[in-house]
Image: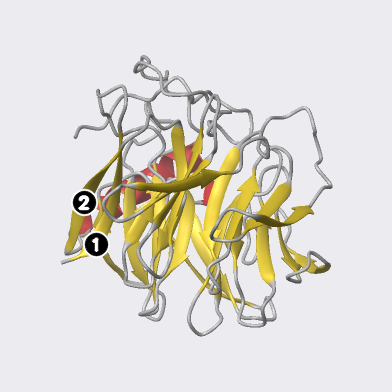
């Protein structure tokens, strides 16, 4: 499979450059985007990303292409459950945005139609429930594994409701049973809710300093409770203790879209260049050792949202950059341990 030119579902956005646009169903490949003029700071971030690509070896993982017997819209995120089943979160013109398949791609069920404007991220909690965000409506949805809606949280406080992207981005699950929500488009904060949807805390502010964010695009929690935040436009991942105290950061550069903490203590981040002719320009998933700050390797794959399964499988949200010419089939990609 080859990576396509950026599909028509992507448009330039005003917030710190291009962002993913509200989706349409699969379309013919569009002409590449015109690169925008970058600031000196953004150019430096792109150079930083290039240096990490050059110096980082490929991770010893197997790229697995899975055929799904339906035409998906833009695959914005994926997640896996303990059995290895895959939840695909896509942006269809019509139909269910959540499609559950087994390891071979067989469709098990689908759900969620009518609940979304811009599907953004999907996550499976330790109990097997499915959580999603909508980057437009500021809503978080919780479902059972069977697709029954259990909870809807409206985060709200959208600074500019006219903007398509001005809302929540990612979800993580602390050991206390609550949930964390990153609210990155327009706001720059992390919120904490109880399992029944009561807000108990929020923190974060816009900026470039330690503990500040310029579009927190994703959030994840490590096995020791450390909170990791993908600080997208600052090109870095930052980490905090359970009391939200700043602990450290790793600057990769470009746009750092996603973060996923693994059971071995490593952290995977999805990064791509700023202002490139394609969304996936210099797109890679890097593994970071947060104890040493070292980059342990990379996978050459754009990942808008990234999740790590219980068995170490990596589920990248590959957008619609994987081509499959069969009108009744789509291809998703996962990475599994060799």
Residue 112 seen in this snapshot: yes
Q: Identify the image quadrant of the N terminus.
A: top left
- In the structure shown, which secondary structural element does the residue marked by tag 1 occupy? strand
**Disc 2 marks which residue?**
64
Q: Position of residue 17 (x, y in %)?
A: 55, 32
Residue 210: x %, y % from top left: 62, 66
Earlier in the chain: of badge 1 and badge 2, it is 2
Decide if residue 156 is on the left or right side of residue 50: right
Q: What percent of the width, then of the height, locates residue 241? A: 61, 80
In the drawing, does residue 240 fall left or right of residue 158? left
Name the outermost residue toward the bottom. 224
Instruction: Confirm whether residue 231 shows in the render.
Output: no
Q: Which residue lies at the image location 78% right of the left edge and 27% below the top edge?
A: 162
Q: Are marks 1 and 2 in contact (CB under 8 Å)?
A: yes
The residue located at (25%, 48%) in the rendering is 300
- Residue 164 or residue 331, whichever sits in front: 331
Tag 1 residue: 336
């Amino acid at each position: 499979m080859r990576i396509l030119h950026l599909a028509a579902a992507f448009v330039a956005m005003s917030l710190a450059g291009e962002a993913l646009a509200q989706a349409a169903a699969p379309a013919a490949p569009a002409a590449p985007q015109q690169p925008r003029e970058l600031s000196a700071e953004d150019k430096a971030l792109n150079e930083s990303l290039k240096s990490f690509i050059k110096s980082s070896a490929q991770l010893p993982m197997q790229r697995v292409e899975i055929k799904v017997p339906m035409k998906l819209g833009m695959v914005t995120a994926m997640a896996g459950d303990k059995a290895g089943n895959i939840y695909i979160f896509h942006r269809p013109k019509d139909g269910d945005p959540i499609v559950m398949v087994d390891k071979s791609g067989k469709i098990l069920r689908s759900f969620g139609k009518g609940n979304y404007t811009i599907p953004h991220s999907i996550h499976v909690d330790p109990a097997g429930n499915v959580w999603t965000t909508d980057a437009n409506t500021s809503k978080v949805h919780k479902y059972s594994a069977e697709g029954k809606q259990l909870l809807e949280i409206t985060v709200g406080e959208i600074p500019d409701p006219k903007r398509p992207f001005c809302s929540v981005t990612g979800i993580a699950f602390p050991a206390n049973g609550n949930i964390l929500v990153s609210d990155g488009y327009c706001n720059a904060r992390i919120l904490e809710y109880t399992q029944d949807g009561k807000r108990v805390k929020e923190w974060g502010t816009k900026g470039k300093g330690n503990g500040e964010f310029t579009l927190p695009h994703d959030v994840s929690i490590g096995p020791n409770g450390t909170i990791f935040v993908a600080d997208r436009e600052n090109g870095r991942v930052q980490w905090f203790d359970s009391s939200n105290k700043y602990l450290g950061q790793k600057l990769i550069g470009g746009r750092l879209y996603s973060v996923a903490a693994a059971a071995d203590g490593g952290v995977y981040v999805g990064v791509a260049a700023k202002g490139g002719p394609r969304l996936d320009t210099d797109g890679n998933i890097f593994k970071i050792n947060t104890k040493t700050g070292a980059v342990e390797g990379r996978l050459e794959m754009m990942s808008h949202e990234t999740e790590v399964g219980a068995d170490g499988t990596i589920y990248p949200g590959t957008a619609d950059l994987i081509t499959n010419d069969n009108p009744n089939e789509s291809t998703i990609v996962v990475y599994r341990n060799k």
